[in-house]
Image (tube, rainbow, N blue to C red):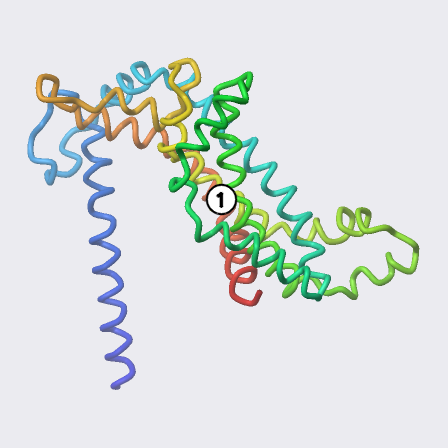
Amino acid sequence: MKNKSIKIIIHVAITLILAINLLPLVIALSSSFRKVNNMTNPLKLFDEFSLESYMIAFEKMNFLQAFWNSIILTTIPVIVVVIFSAMAAYPLARINNKLSKFLFFFFICGLVVPSQMVIIPIVQTMSSLNLPSPHLPPILMFITNSIPFALFLFTGFIRSSVPIELEESAIIDGAGVFRRFWSIVFPLLIPVTVAVVITQGVWIWNDYFYNMIFISSSEYTPLPLAMLGFMGDQTNPTAWNVLFAACFLASLPLLIIFAFLQKFFISGLTVGSVKG
């Protein structure tokens, strides 16, 4: 009876915490379905259903162009990070000597050294390179910031979940390192690859800092910067209903992707980081 009471208390506490965390999201969703001028009490949930705020947000933020820019700024870094991190993690997980341990911790140090501390020399360096596209500087920053965490996950996953015995027959057949990696190891990395894609893809998609620093032209503006147009000032108050609608429009692609990949995400994140 005592254990049952404890379980009930735990479930009630979890439900309350979940409700508290979901309440702001529900309020924002309810407000996004109101008309622009409907500024009544936001706690009156779903008292109106209108797509006016979504239509204004879609048009004002030039959604299709901003969406395409976000796709470019997210897809390229994620692909590069997955390929290079997986290739680097393979020898680090298989070779057990002082050099491999040093290199592993060298890469992991990137998790504790924020690039924002040295953003001024980084901006100066990027400006001197005369890169052909405004998208390239933030893409390079996304790659360098994502590799340490991705390498950590891939290395732990290979050590714990990819037995070296699977490669022995290929070694006997004379398969080289690249063939063993791409033919045997990499196909087994689907769970941790999905974890890397989601964890790094989400923060890159939502990033505001690097995009604001390096992108100034509206032609190359991604969704986070496009939403700045909805922030008001003293003479032009913020249209909160439209801003909430813009937030949900920007978040919808990520929610759809996560809904399809959540099973792989959870298994890859837990196995790769806990057992590794």
Q: How many marks?
A: 1
Q: Nearer the viewer, residue 183 or 89?
A: 89
Q: Nearer the viewer, residue 276 or 144?
A: 144
x 51%, y 65%: residue: 274
> In the picture, which quadrant includes the N terminus?
bottom left
x 44%, y 28%: residue: 123
Q: Position of residue 185 (x, y in %)?
A: 73, 53
Disc 1 crowd, CA 10 A, few/some/many (<14, 14-19, 20+)? some
In the image as oriented, which residue stretches furthest toward the right? 173
Q: Position of residue 11 (x, y in %)?
A: 27, 68
Q: Identify whether 237 is placed above or below 247.
A: above
Q: Which quadrant of the structure image shows residue 222?
A: top left
Q: Position of residue 223 (x, y in %)?
A: 37, 26
Q: Nearer the viewer, residue 113 or 269?
A: 113
In the image as oriented, which residue stretches furthest toward the bottom? 1
Position of 163 compared to 266: left or right? right
Amino acid type of the residue that numbered disc 1 sits on in the rendered structure: Ile
Q: Identify whether 212 is placed above or below 198.
A: above
Q: Position of residue 220 (x, y in %)?
A: 44, 18
Q: Identify whether 132 is placed above or below 77.
A: above
The residue identified by callout 1 is 198
x 76%, y 50%: residue: 181
Position of 42 compared to 126: left or right? left
> In the picture, which quadrant includes the C terminus?
bottom right
Q: Secondary structure at mark 1?
A: helix
Position of 261 compared to 102: left or right? left
